Amino acid sequence: MKLKRTTGVATLLAGVLTSGGVLADGGAGAQGSLAFGEGGVQTQGDASAGGPAASGGAALEIGLFGGALLPSEDHNFQQEALPHQRFKKLAPELGARFGIYPWGFLGAELEAGAMPTSTADARSAGLYALRAHGVLQHSFGALTPFLLVGGGRMGGDSDAMGTDSDPLLHFGLGAKLRLDDFVGLRLDLRDNLTQKNGAADGSLTHHPEALLGLSFTFDLGGRSKPADGDRDGFADDQDRCPTEAGVAPDGCPDLDPDKDGVPLPEDKCPEQAGVAPDGCPDLDADKDGIPLPQDKCPEEPETVNNYQDEDGCPDTVPEKVKKFTGAVEGIQFATGKATITPRSFATLDQAVAVLKEYGELRVLITGHTDNVGDHDANVKLSEARATAVRDYFIKKGIAAERIDVKGMGPDQPVAGNDTPAGQAKNRRIEFKMQ
């Protein structure tokens, strides 16, 4: 947009801000609130600085805003001798407003906004709006929803269509959120109605608009502010718990801050949503016996199959691993010794290959014997044989920290020891992949 098109709007905005500053200097102080309801407008803080609206006293509000306007395709911002064109569908907007609130629930505002844009043929253009409206609002703690309706003038300036403006009717709703006793956020959703192009006088077209801005509130004096003994932003006459700082809507403490349905004092974990009876998170929701954080699949139970049984996830044992899970056939030792016989090497080498392929696996090697001979000697022998297998694996390149050994002696038989065949089955090496 050319400089000549923005000069008038910029001058107007400067005038609004200047007049607002003069009025502010004449006020009783620079304390105020963005929420202007009857009582209950403060967030937690000093009740002596609750702002004018907390008591229904007069207040001045000055604001800056930005947003977007959706210009109607049927706008009438053109000189009659020039052809009609659409503006770009979305026009950014900047502006300022000045408001006076004689009472906490009712006020009047003036505002001006400028919207740089372009026409459909990509030629420079600009829109502007000058508006006045009444505001009806009610506070809920620091949040103040409001309705507004008013009138003014909206116009445009472009090379393609010249300069023109039309009367404006606008209405909308929004909310103010007080950040402290002086500054707050404000959201407006509006519709602007102006004359429709090519239609009879009084036929209107729509220009929707969304605005977000900062507002600054000044106390102009008024009635004394109500007492707020617990300084939670709710006046004592509206606070159901006047001696305990609380939250909306009634000023009482939030007995369930994590919203898990378990109130204080029963909730032992008030900052984490949990389950009855103590309000703490269920560390073993899938009931597989593996709690968080060890359980990598907290919503699915572990498949107990001697393969990665500690991660808490369901799984299927790979066929290669399954071959070396449990008692392993083909591992033999010299009688009464922990010396591995050469015929066992092929089986052990296959186990080494599996451990190398599945590098995340650990293995527990357990030695077992029959019940022939001294019990303690058999336990020592079984552990020595498991250690011999471990040493073989390490020699073949398997990291020592991946291997654990245990000797069970004759204490876990898988067959009867009253026959040579049963004794042979009990003399075994077992692998447990983890």
Image (spheres, rainbow, N blue to C red):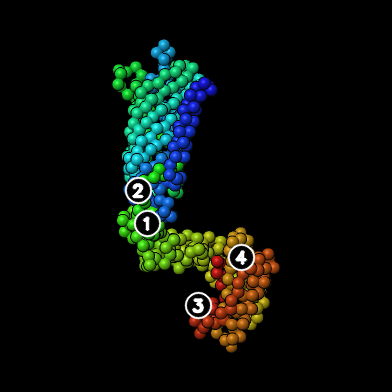
Amino acid of disc 1: Asp
- Marks 1 and 4, the one that precedes in the sequence: 1
| Above or below 32: residue 169 | above
Residue mark closest to the camera, 1 vs 4: 1
Q: Which of 282 and 21 is in front in this view?
A: 21
User: Marks 3/2: CA distance?
Assistant: 92 Å
Amino acid of disc 4: Ala
Amino acid of disc 3: Val
Residue mark closest to the camera, 1 vs 2: 2
- Marks 4 and 3, the one that precedes in the sequence: 4
User: Marks 4/3: CA distance?
Assistant: 22 Å
Residue mark closest to the camera, 3 vs 1: 1
Q: Name the residue under label 2.
A: 223
**Residue 61: % across, % down:** 42, 40
- Do the residues bearing badges 4 and 3 touch, measured as CB atoms within 8 Å? no
- Marks 4 and 2, the one that precedes in the sequence: 2
Q: What element carries label 4?
A: helix
Q: Name the residue under label 1.
A: 228
- Marks 3 and 1, the one that precedes in the sequence: 1
User: Marks 4/2: CA distance?
Assistant: 88 Å
Q: Is mark 2 on a helix, strand or loop?
A: loop
Amino acid of disc 2: Arg
Q: Mark 4 points at which residue?
A: 351
* Residue at screen point 43% across, 55% down: 46
- Do the residues bearing badges 4 and 2 touch, measured as CB atoms within 8 Å? no
Q: What element carries label 1?
A: loop
- Marks 1 and 2, the one that precedes in the sequence: 2
- Circle 3: is it few (<14), some (14-19), or many (20+) Cα within 10 Å? some
- Viewed as shown, does residue 363 lie left or right of 16? right
Of the numbered discs in the image, which one, if any, rests on residue 414?
3
